[in-house]
Amino acid sequence: MATRFFKRNEQIKRLSREHHFSLLFCWKIRQGLKNEVPDYRICQYVQYFWKQNLQLHFREEEKFFFVSLKDRRVQRAINEHKLIKQEIEGLTNHSARNFRKRLAALADMVDDHVRYEEKILFPHLQRRLSREQFEIIGRQIQEENRSCPKDLFEDQFWNSR
């Protein structure tokens, strides 16, 4: 079966650009693990990226897009947001074990989640939501006045060799 490509609705385009940053986040974690960077450095980056990017991104998706349609696909995305948040919060527990396995699992979780939203959920939302609903969502997003994420974390551990 051929894959159908959708032209992204303008209101979803920014979220798709933010997904690109999330995939880079996963790559950076994996590079850090591959280069045997100390766990605490990677965990500091995870906390930074959560506060500066992912947390805000999840909140915006849930507040504006997911409330417009309650079905199993949207619920899956909400559930994945909760699991990712729990995993990130678990990394702040200094007595936790298996940081490297947990960091790898987090990278896989976020990667899978982004690909799910891009390939399945966003096309689904575009089919199910009306133009008027997207216009309302667009106005709400503009009122938030949130800029596209920036990754200004100083410790570029992913470049370590």
Image (cartoon, rainbow, N blue to C red):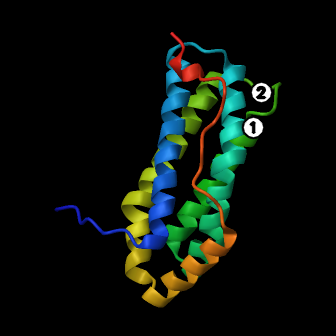
- The spot of residue 28 in percent (x, y) is 53, 29
Q: Which residue is mark 1?
A: 90
Horizontal side, residue 116 vs residue 37: left or right: left
Q: Amino acid at mark 2?
A: Ala
Q: Nearer the viewer, residue 18 or 77?
A: 18
N-term-proximal mark, 2 vs 1: 1
As helix, strand or loop, the secondary structure at mark 2 comes to: loop
> Closer to the camera, 109 or 145?
145
Say what amino acid the circle numbered 1 marks: Gly
What number is the disc on residue 52?
none
Q: Are marks 2 and 1 in contact (CB under 8 Å)?
A: yes
User: Callout 1: 10 Å neighbours few (<14), some, many (20+)?
Assistant: some
Residue 98 appears in view: no
Quarter of the image holding residue 153?
Answer: top right
Quickly name the residue at label 2. 96
- Mark 2, Cα crowd under 10 Å, few <14 / some 14-19 / many 20+, is few
The residue sitting at 66% across, 67% down in the picture is 145
Q: x and y percent of residue 2 in the render?
A: 17, 62
**Residue 119: x, y in percent?**
37, 59
Residue at coordinates 54% horizontally, 37% vertically from top-left?
A: 25
Asked if residue 135 is positioned above or below residue 54 in the image, the reply reads below
Helix, strand or loop at disc 1?
helix
Residue occupying image coordinates x 54% and y 14%: 160
- Can you give x and y, in whole percent of width and height, for residue 46 in the image? 66, 35
Q: Quick check: can you spot residue 91?
A: yes
Judge from the rendering whether residue 4 lies leftward or rightward of residue 102; answer left or right.
Answer: left
The Cα atoms of the two marked residues, 2 and 1, are separated by 7 Å
Would you place residue 45 above or below residue 118 in this image? above
Residue lying farthest left? 1
